[in-house]
Image (cartoon, rainbow, N blue to C red):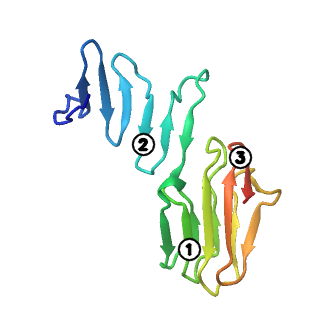
Amino acid sequence: MGFLLENKNSLGRYVIPTSSNGITVYNPFSVIPSGNLDKQFSIDSGGIIEIGNPNNDNYNNIIFNAGINNAFKQLTDNGADYLLTNNDYFVEVISTTYNYVTLPLANNIGGRTYIISNGSTNINLVVRTSGIDNIDGRTQIALKRIHDRIKLQSNGIDNWYVI
């Protein structure tokens, strides 16, 4: 059975009618059964895929993070500190003006993975944590040579692991 999504309702959401129940598909992509206010499946603009109900602790949600889309970014501007986002996966620092790449809080993003690479001659490039987080017991790790890189994964609480 297939559905053709061509008409939006008054809220700008696509509605797929069925014989007794409807499914609403949100943009960027969330599936919510009619009469239910909680998402059951979603893909956000950062590439995070979530299956399950994030508002109900009785559900065991399956969450895939932005690493799936393998986003690659080169920092070539004259910034000094780059805060990693949901849209990042592999970040290469080309500019010599950056001194820091800051990880987001590990809390609630278990499994999120980042690769940070020093693509410049900057010997002062530091990957650092936010809040009380640690990277394998440290608050920061230096990438001192060109082509030094590190791959980190969140434990979902307060730690980033070097993998």
CB of mark 1 within 8 Å of CB of mark 2? no
What crowding class fits label 2: few (fewer than 14 Cα within 10 Å), some (14-19), or many (20 or more)?
some
Estimate the x, y position of residue 92 in percent, counting from the top left: 56, 74
Where the N terminus falls, by quadrant? Answer: top left
Determine the residue located farthest toward the bottom in the rendered image.
121
Residue corresponding to mark 2: 43
Residue corresponding to mark 1: 92
What crowding class fits label 3: few (fewer than 14 Cα within 10 Å), some (14-19), or many (20 or more)?
some
In the rendered image of this protein, does residue 93 appear above or below residue 72? Answer: below
Name the residue at 65% across, 44% down.
Answer: 110
Residue corresponding to mark 3: 155
In the rendered image of this protein, does residue 141 appear above or below residue 157? Answer: below
Between marks 3 and 1, how big is the CA–CA gap?
23 Å
The earlier-in-sequence mark between 1 and 2 is 2
Q: Of tags 1 and 2, which is closer to the observer?
A: 2
Q: Amino acid at mark 2?
A: Ile
Q: 77 or 135, which is in the foreground?
A: 135
Q: 33 or 83, which is in the foreground?
A: 33
Name the residue at 19% across, 33% down.
Answer: 8
The earlier-in-sequence mark between 3 and 1 is 1
Q: Amino acid at mark 3?
A: Asn
Q: Is residue 6 left or right of residue 116?
A: left
Estimate the x, y position of residue 18 in percent, counting from the top left: 25, 19
What crowding class fits label 1: few (fewer than 14 Cα within 10 Å), some (14-19), or many (20 or more)?
many
The earlier-in-sequence mark between 2 and 3 is 2
Q: Amino acid at mark 1?
A: Glu
